[in-house]
Structures are given as C-alpha cells and as structure tokens.
Image (cartoon, coloured by chain):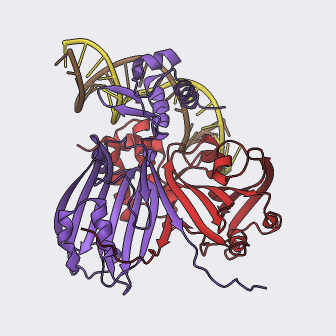
Chain colours: A red, B purple, C yellow, D brown
Amino acid sequence: MPSRRQAIADDIRNQIATGQFKAGERLPSEASLASRYQVSTPTLRNALMLLQGEGLVEKIHGKGNFVQHTSRRITYLGGGRTSREDAAVDPALHVSVRTVRLQAQGHLIALLKVPANSQLTQFLCIRSEGGTPHSLARIYVPCHLPEAGPLCESPSSAGFEARLMDLHPPLAEIRECVAARLPTPEEAEILRISPNLAVLAITRVAVDSTGRVVEAAQLVFPGHRTDAYFITRPVTVKKRREG
Amino acid sequence: MPSRRQAIADDIRNQIATGQFKAGERLPSEASLASRYQVSTPTLRNALMLLQGEGLVEKIHGKGNFVQHTSRRITYLGGGRTSREDAAVDPALHVSVRTVRLQAQGHLIALLKVPANSQLTQFLCIRSEGGTPHSLARIYVPCHLPEAGPLCESPSSAGFEARLMDLHPPLAEIRECVAARLPTPEEAEILRISPNLAVLAITRVAVDSTGRVVEAAQLVFPGHRTDAYFITRPVTVKKRREG
DNA sequence: GAGTGGTCTAGACCACGAG
DNA sequence: TCGTGGTCTAGACCACTCA
C-alpha cells in the first residue's frame, strides 16, 4: 500500500507531466492543496518534498511552490575537467571567491599530506546562476607551491584547471570521493536548499608526479539538481591468465 | 539560532563520541528520549534521522535505535574496478542474482544505444553483508554479445569485471554518472533504509573500442554509508599556449 | 501482549516576501 | 499587514519484533 504522501506526489507529478501545472507556474498554497487532498499540512509538505527531491518543484519561503524549469541541472565533470558552463563563457554564471590563509589542522593534514600548522590558502567559492546558488567549493592549496599566488586573480574554474595543467612537476592523478549526505545547516543556507534534502559532496585531491598534493577541494552541490560525470579509460593490461 | 532537532542531534552525537553511548548499543526508546529532551516525538525522530544520515545511528523497526559500528562504510570504485570486499574474497558478503530477459524500452534504448525492442539480459543483483543489504544493481547486457551467457554462472562483481577485461574488441571507456536522490519506495524497502534518506545512484556505461555499448548498469547504494571513489590520470597533453 | 519505530493528524507559532 | 512556507506540538493509529 503506497503511503499517503507518495500518492499525492504521484498525482501532482502527473499534473506537471500533463501540463496542468506549467513550468515556472506557482502551485496552489500548501494549505489549499492540503484541504484538496484531505490531508494535514505536514503530510502535504512531505509530498512536496519528494517532488523537490526530484527537481520538479522549487520551494521559496514566503512566496510559494513553483514548478521547476526542467534541464536546469548542474553538471560536474570529474578528472579535473571543466564543464562548458563556465563563468568565463556563460555570463549568467557568477562566482564569488573569498581567500583565506590558514594553518593546516584536523582532517586537512591528512588530506593534503602536509605537516600540522603549515600554511594553506583556502578559496571559498560560491557559484550562482541568476541568483540561485549552484555549488559551494572549499579549495585548499599548500603555500609551498609557487602557483598559489596568481590564482586569486583568476577565480573561475578554468583558472584552477589551467593551473593544474601547467604544473612542474606535472599533474599525475586526480582522486575524487563522492558521497551523498544531508547538508550542514550552513550549507543548506548558502545553497538555499531544504536541510532535509541531500547534497552531493565531492572531495577532490590532485597529486603531481612526485606524489605531492597540489590541491584539495571539498565541493558541495544540491543533490536534486546535480549529476557528476566520470569518464575512465581502462589501463590497457595484458589479458589475464587465470585458472 | 540552531533548530531544536539540530541541538538534540548534536547532544546525542557528543554522547556517542565520548563513549556514553557505545557502538552496537541500543539507545533509549524514542518516547523516553523525547521526554528527556522535552520535545515531541516527531522532533526527536527528526534528530535521529540526522544521525542516521551521518551513519552514526541505525534504526530497526520494532527493535530500537542502535549506535552504528563505525567503518561499516561501503566503497564503490569507479572505472570498472572491483573493490577488495568482493563476494569471492569475503564470505560475509552475499550476492543474489536474478536474471531476466527483456526487450529494450524507454530510456534503456538511449542508454545502451540499441534498437527498440531488441533483446536484453537484465541481471538484478542485491548485495548483502550479514543480512544487511549493501547495494542494488540492475545490469543490462545486449544479447548480441556472445559473452552474455556465461555471466549467469559467475554472479560476483569479479565475474562482471573479468568479462569486461576479456572483450573482443577490447573495452575502451567507462562512463559513470553519479547522482544523489531519494529512493523509490521499492529501493527503500530492498535496501532497508528510510525513504527520507538519499541514495547514491550511479549509472555506468561500458563502451568497447568500436563505440558499442557492452554493458549498462544502474547501481543504487544507501547514501549515508557509501563512498564512491574515482581515480583519473589526466591525458598527457602538450602544454597549452594561450594568449 | 508489551514495546518498539513508522505514519499521520489538526493545529500553533515563527520567519520570510510583497504590497 | 497579509499570505506564504518552516518548525514544532501532543497525541492517535498501525506494523514490526520478541518473549
């Protein structure tokens, strides 16, 4: 037996699919929807949360629930490649960067493989598109790298990518760890998402050919709007002989 | 001002960290915790849901809330590599496989790049460790591939991996798309997770050197216990000359 | 049957957005 | 100020587990 909220979510989803609720339109208020479906407000809100998790509905506090324009998804490309939708290309995209110098502590020591209390540069980046936050990035660069300076002047993703490509010694490997988790209250506020909806959290470490960590990044994306793509070409090994 | 459930979650998290609640132990019942913290049961349950999302607490219907043993995380390795924790190695792991032959329909046509209604083999795999479901995999193999048959006899991940390594023409590329979303009711039931907690959904497509899709897989993991790792070695390109 | 968590109710109160 | 969504309450009822 499907739960109440599932049934309501299914019904509203159908109405969106059949165009009875159109993209960009505002849904009836939660109170009126609740009375229409004969459920209490928390139950109706649960149903809307499901649709929000599918990227079909956007909730805006004080204004209402809106049918999302489709294909507003965020694309993250693994392997250090920059997606086409870069701030340098798309004027609707905006990136704010705050630079902080700090000392390595806690998990950053292991992540960057640096001694405790060594100097780091942290870049706090928030990407937005037309007022809607897209992603939150905390990028750490050890200060022993000469490239750490000029970065501040090219805060776009392309700037970071170009830096990694021009390293001496060259970049050898990028390791990325992807997880789904609930946002911290701060992340939920910055990304303007419900604290009940998961974020896609990516920890990225770039290593040069000497094994030194040249950059570590903690990236957070709203889970319901993000796809992360990874393309791998298998190392061409000799065919295994087993048994 | 932190919300009520956050404050409660913080407090219980501390008690777990300081060992006042030990790993494997059962927490007091939700009713007693609610009265201890002077909140209603839904609010207390919300706090526990946060801890569940962090992998600290496991809820078992009819039994209670238990402090999770740490390091029970699930590891997914991208790029078609198999993690060490394989059924062939670890006897505690169990994989159940159901094989279904079906015709390509809907999104499978685009995913596998096959004509509509062409024959496919679907493998429905559920991995468990000691009774706890780990992952749900729907693996699709086009029937035009001669390797489709023997697969059924080696349902471990290693079997799938070995098959991809022995292809003619050889495997050229693996594309993986990672997303965080709420589980469908069926997925929540199979994985035994709360329908409010996100899953990590990975769509994996393996392509051989002729561009043909040799396998597509839709993998679902419980988000609060899973890390997906991707390691990329950048293609060594000539240094860019720009501006 | 006793105790547990899962879902839902019918409302209260607060915070935000727009006029 | 008014309507909106966000959070919380105090309880009801059901499903599951175990003795």
Quadrant assignment for the C terminus of chain B: bottom right
Q: Can you give x and y, in whole percent of width and height, for residue B180 in the image?
A: 46, 55
Residue B153: x percent and y percent?
17, 64
Q: Is residue A192 above or below residue A231?
A: above
Residue at left offset 21%, top offset 68%: B151
Within the image, what quadrant is residue B68 found in?
Answer: top left
**Image coordinates for residue A112, horizontal then vertical, percent:** 67, 54
Specify whether residue A17 is in view: yes
Instruction: Report which quarter residue B163 is drawn in.
Output: bottom left
Q: In which quadrant will I find the N terminus of chain B?
A: top right
Is residue A56 visible in the rendered structure shown here? no
At a point 29% along the width and 27% down the height, the residue shown is B62
Image position, residue A24 (x, y; %):
52, 62
Would you place residue B6 above or below residue A197 in this image? above
Q: Residue at position x 75%, y 57% from top?
A: A142
Q: Quadrant of residue D2?
A: top right
Say left or right for B48 vs B114. Answer: right
- Residue shown at the point (71%, 65%) measured from the top left: A94
